[in-house]
Image (spheres, rainbow, N blue to C red):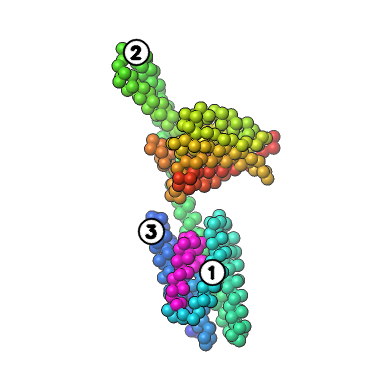
Amino acid sequence: MKQFSEELLLHFFLMMIIPLASTLLIGKAEKVFRLSLFGILILTTFLTMSFPVEISDGLSFDLKFIPVFVTFLYLGPKPGVFSIAAIVLFESVNSPNTIPISLLNYLIISIPLFILTRKYHQYKITKKIGIASLFYILISFSRLILLIATGKLDASFYVLMFTIISFAALCAIIYFIELTRLQVYMLEQLQNAEKMNAISQLAASVAHEIRNPMTTIRGFMQIMRDEKNLTSEQTMYVSLSLDELDRTHNIINDFLSLARPCGSDFEILNASSLLKETVEFMRPYSTIANVDIQSNIQDGANIEGSPTEFKQLIINLMKNGIEAMPEGGELIIICQSQNGFVSIIIVDKGIGLSTKQLNQLGLPYYSTKTKGTGLGLMISFNILKRMKGKVQIDSEINKGTKFTLVFKETVS
């Protein structure tokens, strides 16, 4: 019993290397983090398999399923398959006769893990632990069948203790990894809040002062452009200067939008009507860019918010979609009301975004455009937040981007 307890505790603390490693790797580049964590998971797998817990003669167990579970659900299907391949390779050296059974077991385990990887990160921590519990119940059931088949039911107490410790280890790993992820998220939110505060203060104190001299300069430039004695080259320079002044003016407006306090002018909006107006407003701009706007807007969709801000939100997203298709294309706008929610979908067939770019959307000064400031999407997300809406962004390089905005429907 003493030796069994010592071996059990050894395996438990071996598994605790995983959350410790994820904590120590905070702040590392994504690629370094994933490779390092994968290496730690493979290491703990080999260690637990090299020193299994002896239950009785010819009967031993280890915790190799835990690293496999973590690899699949926190690093993805491909690393998960590699971890299983590493286990099979290890077993082929030590006990080649068990390979067919092992392959069948891992195939059965891999199928639900593949399915879970798609939505696992959307679940709350309690549901994640519940999923882990379900898997371990199945594993415990298979161990019980093994005991019955080998006639070793007298070892049931040891198997029960091993199962409890295994389950505790898996739950602890999930809890600490999720806690680490939450800390990283909160740190990012704090940094973003500090940037927002700095930008708002800058906007409030500087934007108006810059706009006044710019208005004067623009007026004189317009007068100069109307002069008849200018050469074609001078006229071009004046026109370019006016264009740059207009671009600067738009950036200042963006700063002022950030500094504007949350409005109290919220009212019940006919989102369908406002969307149709915005689509018609954007048609000339899309025509110049050789982009065809296709709309399917359901009537009678009502939400709560500011009409001006709502239009600004849609214009920003439509403008981004149009600019994402430099060679032209099709922009699709859909509005539908269902189950008490209004969904607005904006789809472009443009250049798309990578996962890294998606994670940085809405950050101050981050833009995928050469001359962009990143403030447009930042303002859009702020408006969405004030209107208590949610956004889901799906994108793929060279295939396009899909924005799905969801608002609570309001009864007029």
Q: Residue furthest right?
A: 412
- Give the Cα separation between the discs numbered 1 and 2: 79 Å
Place of residue 294 in the rendered image (x, y in percent of width and height, measured from the top left): 57, 35
Is 69 within the magenta? yes
Would you call the spot at circle 3 few (<14 residues within 10 Å), some (14-19), or many (20 or more)?
few
Q: Nearer the viewer, residue 67 or 281?
A: 281
Magenta range is 67-92
Quarter holding the C terminus? top right
The answer to whether mark 2 and mark 3 are in CB contact below 8 A is: no
User: On screen, 77 above or below 1?
Assistant: above
Q: Residue at x 61, y 38 (%)?
A: 335
Place of residue 21 in the rendered image (x, y in percent of width and height, measured from the top left): 42, 64
Q: Nearer the viewer, mark 3 or mark 1?
A: 1
Is 322 within the magenta? no
The answer to whether mark 3 and mark 1 are in CB contact below 8 A is: no
Which sits earlier in the primary sequence, circle 2 or circle 3? 3
Q: Residue furthest top?
A: 228
Which sits earlier in the primary sequence, circle 3 or circle 1? 3
Q: Residue at x 49, y 55 (%)?
A: 182
- The amino acid marked with disc number 1 is Leu
Mark 3, residue position: 32
Residue 280 circle label: none
Q: Secondary structure at mark 3?
A: helix
- Give the Cα separation between the discs numbered 3 and 1: 29 Å
Q: Secondary structure at mark 2?
A: loop
Q: Nearer the viewer, residue 346 or 341?
A: 346
- The amino acid marked with disc number 3 is Val
User: On screen, 112 above or below 386?
Assistant: below
- The amino acid marked with disc number 2 is Glu
Mark 2, residue position: 227
User: On screen, 26 above or below 208?
Assistant: below
